Amino acid sequence: MAGADNVEKLDDGIVRAAEEVVGQIRTAKSAISTVIFGQDRVIENTLVTILSGGHALLIGVPGLAKTKLVETLGITLGLDAKRIQFTPDLMPSDILGAEVLDESVSGKRSFRFISGPVFAQLLMADEINRASPRTQSALLQAMQEQHITVAGARHDLPKPFHVLATQNPLEQEGTYPLPEAQLDRFLMEIDVDYPDRDAERRILFETTGADQTLAKAAMNSEILITAQRLVRRLPVGDSVVEAILSLVRSARPGDEGGETGKLIAWGPGPRASQSLMLAVRARALLDGRLAPSIDDVLDLAEPILKHRMALTFSARAEGRTIPDVIRQLKTRIG
């Protein structure tokens, strides 16, 4: 396994901590799977995003349990979860909160800050592309800097803080595409596809009967923060680092992409490399491994890169797609 050569260098404390955390993470993953059926890849990538300390954009048609997934994650991981339904008339203050004028019994007036739903550990931004750019941008500072500023005063967000946003790929009328700067804040773009036949059969029986399986707590925020710190301490072998650099750099226009690079109008910046570096470690930990492999890089390349790239007009005219281009770039790695 690439990167396994570094495992011997781990001290006993990290190994013991990893063994303890892996058991708790697996219990949480199993608990989520008892409520959400047929979306194993989505559950895994969402957990990888949270373990990496990042935010995820879930793309899928209505009715695929995106909202239920976020609710279940909140309960299972022991996080304070809140939901915002994004609409065209939503204002930034509806997300962040606002200052209100209070008057005491003695007649003294003062401003008091009333916090908005962004003050949560797990925030679901439902149909984020339905809100205006002004409202979308209200999340930018929160997602990147873990605090907000209202009336010149700084307010820190709770830790951990994760945004799981959903976006409907249909009915694009009345929507505002997310700007590139905001898309780059999402560690992953996760496609939520239709379940297979067996999973849908199970959904029919499990969700339309008298009793429904309810989510159960398996972790808490302290354990999650410990796991996130552990992810950053896991070693990454030189071959994995080189694979990350080669893949991300070849996804930009220029010579490093070869012929494929000519199809790319703009590509991922260093934040994509950072995201991939964290995500491969988190995926290894989720699998019970103490070091990531090149396979982790290849498996996570598409959800981490595809929302950070655009193809040239001629490439799109030829029917090329970003997933196709990423698959082509991956063949050069392994």
Image (tube, rainbow, N blue to C red):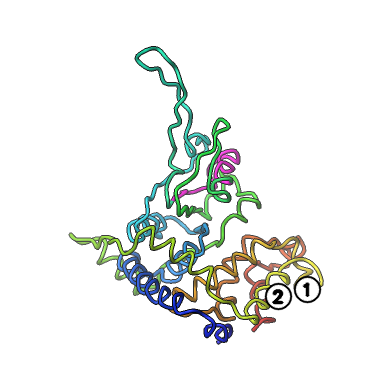
Residue reaching furthest top? 107
- Label 2 secondary element: helix
Q: Is residue 73 left or right of residue 4?
A: left
Whether 137 is among the magenta residues is yes
Q: Is residue 125 magenta?
A: yes
Instruction: Give the amino acid type for the residue marked by disc 1 in the picture.
Output: Glu
Residue 178 or residue 170, whichever sits in front: 178
The answer for how far apart the CA atoms under marks 1 and 2 are is 8 Å
Q: Residue at x 45, y 31 (%)?
A: 113
Front-most of residues 67 and 230: 230
Please report the residue visible at 50 percent of the width from the left and 70 percent of the height from the top.
282
Residue range corresponding to the magenta coloring = 123-140
Q: Which of 50/237 is in front?
A: 237
203 horizontally vs 44: left or right: left
The reply to whether discs 1 and 2 touch (Cβ–Cβ < 8 Å) is: yes
Q: Which of the labelled discs sits on residue 256, or is there none?
A: 1
Q: Position of residue 25 (x, y in %)?
A: 38, 70
Task: Please give the name of the residue rendered at 70% of the width and 75% of the height, measured from the top-left corner.
Answer: 246
Q: Position of residue 51 (x, y in %)?
A: 47, 65
Residue 206 falls in which quadrant of the image?
bottom left
Residue tagged 2: 246
SS under mark 1: helix
Instruction: Say which of 37 and 218 sits in front.
Output: 218
Tell me which label, 1 or 2, sits earlier in the chain. Answer: 2
x and y percentages locating residue 303 in the rendered image: 56, 66
Image quadrant where one finds the N terminus? bottom right
SS majority, magenta: helix
